[in-house]
Structure formats: structure tokens, C-alpha cells
Image: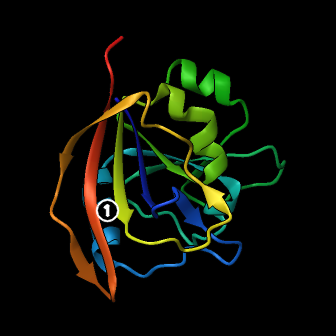
Amino acid sequence: MIRAIAAIDDKRGLATDAGIPWDIPADVAHERQLTKGGNMLMGLATYKEFDTAPSDRQWYVLTDVDEPLKPGFHAVTDLAAFMVQPPKDLWLFGGAGVFAQTISAADELCLTRIQGDFHCTKFFPEFEADFELTTQEPWQTQNNQTFRFETWTRKKS
């Protein structure tokens, strides 16, 4: 199964040029719990936010830069070839470019919906036409930010 996992604001915003504009520890814990043991695909900018590779997942980095990656990260230089036979239990982890290039392959979206407009400059692609909301948890608030967890499943054609 291929799943995307992301936190987005009311305008599908993922981040600003300075990074993620919210601080929601429950979202981080939720992401870690869902993706534990999975295979994670991220872009180079997202990779650069990591000092080390968390050991309970396999980490793949979409990159066209010809330089060695930090230990525990594996370069993906040909996304099309990678997606022909993706690893089992693949999580699309971001950023915006990776989501835009791979959402058509996703079976499921695990989204944290954050109320408000955070004036983001990076956005999650439009998805509502191709996916249906299958579960949503009640709204909750942490650090003065209101959010809920949602699961969207690809519509059957």
C-alpha cells in the first residue's frame, strides 16, 4: 500500500519558507505511530531537516544531487523506476514536490487538518476529487492550535 502522510492547514498549506509553522506534538506522535516500520519517501529539502535516520523505518530520498547521503538514507534518483516496484508499506512523507509527483500513486492519505491559514508557501496537492473521507477523529487543541486526524481513501473507478 502507498500512503501519504501530512499536516495541512485550511488552504492545504504544508510549510512556509521558514519551515512548518505549527507546533503540535500530538501530530508528531501520530505520524511516528502510523509509520513505524514503514518505508519513507521524502524530498531533499525534507531530508536536510534530519540529523540522523530514525532506525525503525527505511528512509528514501528523492534527489538529483550527486553527493553521499547521511547513514541510513538511500538515494532515489529515478522516481518513475522506483514507483514501478515500490517497497511494501511505502509512506510519502513530503515535501510538496514529492507529494505533487506521487499523489497519483497513493491509495490512502493520512492527514492532520489544522484549522486556520498559516500563510504557507508550500502546498499539498488537490485531492478531494480523487479521494473520499473515510475516518475523522474529533477536533482537539494543543498549543492553541485546533486539529484533527483524517483518513482519505482513493475512490474506486
In this rendered view, identify the residue nearer to me: 36 or 147: 147
Q: Is residue 74 above or below residue 120?
A: above
Whether residue 33 is situated above or below residue 127 in the rendered picture: below
Residue 2, image x and y in percent?
40, 32
Residue 56 visible to the viewer: no
Comparing 32 with 12, the one in front is 12
Where's residue 112, x and y in %?
A: 35, 60
Q: Secondary structure at mark 1?
A: helix
In the displayed image of the protein, which residue is found farthest to the bottom? 143
**Residue 134 falls in image quadrant:** top left
Give neighbour class at mark 1: few <14, some 14-19, many 20+ (Cα, 10 Å). some
In the image, what residue occupies the spot 59% across and 60% down? 71
Q: Residue at x 30, y 76 (%)?
A: 146
From the image, which quarter does the N terminus lie in?
top left
Outermost residue to the top: 157
Circle 1 is placed at which residue position?
32
Q: Is residue 84 above or below residue 112?
A: above
Percent x, y of residue 9? 46, 64
Q: Position of residue 51 (x, y in %)?
A: 58, 74
- Residue 128 image-quadrant placement: top left
- The residue at 32%/69% (across/down) is 27
